[in-house]
Image (spheres, grey):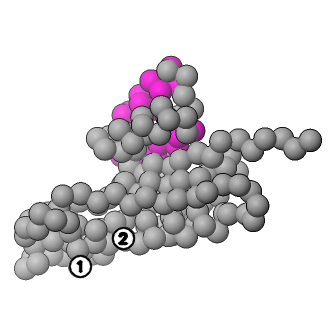
């Protein structure tokens, strides 16, 4: 008799604060094992996961710099080795003020990498880990915000990259 496949988990990037933390809570309370990725919010992410574990949920804070393809691949490989990964929520973002008249190319490229390329890459990595017949319906969710619809000149590179 085959062992039942463990419940697939979810990776929430930028999961330590604000909307990311709320997403981690919602997924955990819905029964998903949660990996809460953070880069600069260790205390918040660890406190959130500790609180969720105290409520009986599976939640782990994961420190990762997701700015490079190699680091994203290493993160997904690591999580897939720990258990099945069924969903990635692309919530992390670079959010630095600039305008169309004064943007700095390096800053703009950093935001494009984090806000556009990283989510595309995470979706690709998730799909590449799919195995025929494993029974896991995988999905990638990409979080947008009001800046996409409420255009103004103060966060030009961020808005373009989203």
Q: Position of residue 52 (x, y in %)?
A: 47, 27
From this view, report whether residue 158 is shown above or below residue 80: below
Look at 28% across and 68% down and name the residue there. 162
The answer to whether residue 41 is visible is: no
The quarter of the displayed image where residue 22 is located? top left
The quarter of the displayed image where residue 130 is located? bottom right
Look at 24% across and 57% down and name the residue there. 145
In the picture, the disc for residue 116 is 2
Q: Which badge, 1 or 2, comes first in the chain's sequence?
A: 1
Look at 68% across and 46% down and name the residue there. 83
From this view, report whether residue 105 is shown above or below residue 70: below
Q: Residues within 10 Å of mark 1 (few under 14, many from 20)?
A: few
Direction from residue 103 to residue 33 in the image, left or right: right
Q: Disc count in the image?
A: 2
Please give the residue where the numbered disc 1 appears in the rendered image.
105
* Magenta stretch, residue numbers: 33-54
Q: Secondary structure under badge 1? A: helix
**Does the segment drawn in magenta span residue 126?**
no
**Does the segment drawn in magenta span residue 37?**
yes
Asked if labels 2 and 1 touch by Cβ distance under 8 angstroms, the answer is: no
Q: Secondary structure under badge 2? A: helix
Direction from residue 96 to residue 18 in the image, left or right: right
Q: Position of residue 138 (x, y in %)?
A: 58, 58
The answer to whether residue 4 is visible is: yes
């Amino acid at each position: 008799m085959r062992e039942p496949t463990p419940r697939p988990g979810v990776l929430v990037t930028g999961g330590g604060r604000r909307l990311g933390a709320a997403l981690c809570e919602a997924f955990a309370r819905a029964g998903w094992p949660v990996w809460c990725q953070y880069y600069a919010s260790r205390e918040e992410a660890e406190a959130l996961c500790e609180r969720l574990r105290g409520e009986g949920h599976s939640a782990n804070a994961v420190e990762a710099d997701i700015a490079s393809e190699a680091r994203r691949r290493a993160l997904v490989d690591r999580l897939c080795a720990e258990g099945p990964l069924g969903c990635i929520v692309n919530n992390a973002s670079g959010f630095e003020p600039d305008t169309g008249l004064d943007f700095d190319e390096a800053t703009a490229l950093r935001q494009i990498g984090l806000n556009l390329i990283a989510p595309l890459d995470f979706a690709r990595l998730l799909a590449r880990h799919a195995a025929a017949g494993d029974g896991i319906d995988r999905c990638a969710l990409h979080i947008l915000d009001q800046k996409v619809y409420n255009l103004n000149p103060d966060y030009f590179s961020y808005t373009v990259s989203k």
